[in-house]
Image (cartoon, grey):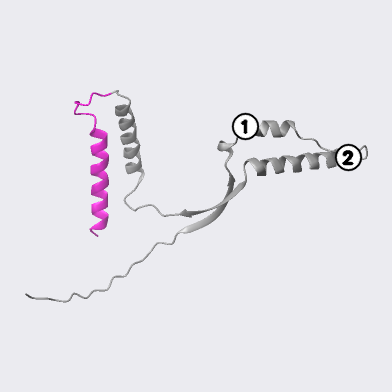
Amino acid sequence: MLRHAICCSVVWVSSSTLSYNVTSRNIKQLDHEELSNDLKAIAIEHSPNDTSTSLVEKYNATLEQLLEKHAPLRARTITDRTSAPWINADVKLQKQQRRQAERAWRKGKYNCKETNIPIPLQACEENHQQRKAGLLSL
């Protein structure tokens, strides 16, 4: 039995990724009924000496507290990654056509035995594999 040692060095160059922080509120999951009840229950105390500006400031502060209660700010870090070099506008268009054909197939617009259903699917996959193989073989 022969045993040979293989020695190699690999230089891995990672692309620089950009990351940035984003703060947002999840407005979609608000309980509208509870928020409506809280808005109806707003009672802003005011005196005759209050100006319209001070009343607006009090009202805004109250609204901000309600918004913070029902939809608090969330901080997230988003990493912006560079796309794969084999993805271009042509591949994106073919993927879009593939998704449309798949949606039509799922809705039952095509018979399962038809042979022309996966044409956009096959064309997209073949183009994707060819571009990927061409770039990786360099």
Q: Seen in the image, is 113 located left or right of residue 84?
A: left
Relative depth, front residue between 41 and 91: 41
User: Residue 57: which numbered mark, if any?
Assistant: none
Relative depth, front residue between 109 and 26: 26
User: Residue 20 in the image: x percent, y percent?
Assistant: 53, 56
Q: Amino acid at mark 2?
A: Thr
Asked where in the image residue 59 lies, by quadrant, the reply is: top right
Relative depth, front residue between 42 and 118: 42
* 45 versus 133 height, above or below: above
Q: Seen in the image, is 19 located left or right of residue 4?
A: right
User: Residue 78 in the image: x percent, y percent?
Assistant: 50, 53
User: Residue 129 in the image: x percent, y percent?
Assistant: 24, 47
| Element under disc 2 | loop
Asked where in the image residue 124 lies, by quadrant, the reply is: top left
Tag 1 or tag 2, which sits nearer the N-term? 1
- Residue 116 colored magenta? yes
User: Residue 32 in the image: x percent, y percent?
Assistant: 62, 32
Q: Amino acid at mark 1?
A: His
Q: Is mark 2 in CB contact (under 8 Å) with mark 1?
A: no
Q: Nearer the viewer, mark 2 or mark 1?
A: 1
User: Residue 51: which numbered mark, if any?
Assistant: 2
Residue bounds of the magenta highlight: 110-138
User: Residue 32: which numbered mark, if any?
Assistant: 1
